[in-house]
Image (cartoon, helix red, strand yellow):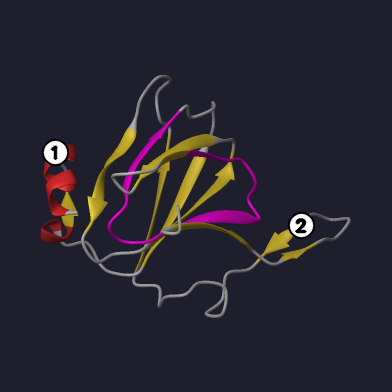
Amino acid sequence: MNKIKIIKIPKIEDHRGNLSVIEKDVLPFEIQRVYYLYDVPAGAERGGHSHKKTKEFLIALSGSFDVIVTDGTLKETVTLNKPYEGLLIENGVWRELNNFSSGSVCLVIASDVFEEEDYIRDFNEFIKSI
């Protein structure tokens, strides 16, 4: 699927601990919103939507989780578990997040501010839109 891509985040290794930096050249969009998911109960799922225009970059800052994506034809599961790489998801891709490990934190960097009109929250509507 060409609408998703793993992107490595620059990592500076040091015996005192590692540091990763996301600056304007790392992502192919200007950052407009940042939010994070945490304390996700065992067995819970997040996501379950697509965006009409927003692009997102997901990172497992701590722990791990699965991102299930589909463009309506192909379906893929990507496990995120490294804080120095993330998953770029273009608009027009349905995503679901599940299988959160205990203590996991999912950071989301978005290309646009929140607008409910940008979301497609019904999978059948998503399929009709493509």
Magenta residue check for 56: no
- x, y (%) of residue 86? 55, 54
Relative height, residue 118 to residue 21 (above, below): above
At numbered mark 2, what does the secondary structure look like: helix, strand or loop?
loop
Residue 19 coordinates in the image, percent (x, y): 71, 61
Magenta range: 77-98
Residue 2: image quadrant is: bottom left
Residue occupying image coordinates x 40% and y 78%: 30
* Residue at 30% over, 61% down: 91
Quadrant containing the C terminus is bottom left
Residue at 54% of width from left, 26% of height from top? 102
* Left or right: 121 as drawn, with respect to 113: left
Quarter-of-image position of residue 55: bottom left
- Residue lying at the far right of the rendered structure: 15
Of 84 and 90, the residue lying toward us? 90
Image position, residue 64 (x, y; %): 57, 35
Instruction: Answer left or right for 39 relative to 33.
Output: right
How many marks on residues? Answer: 2
- Dot label at residue 18: 2
According to the image, label 1 marks what residue? 124
Q: Amino acid at mark 1?
A: Asn
Q: Vertically, is 94 above or below 65? A: below
**Is 4 in front, or is 115?**
4
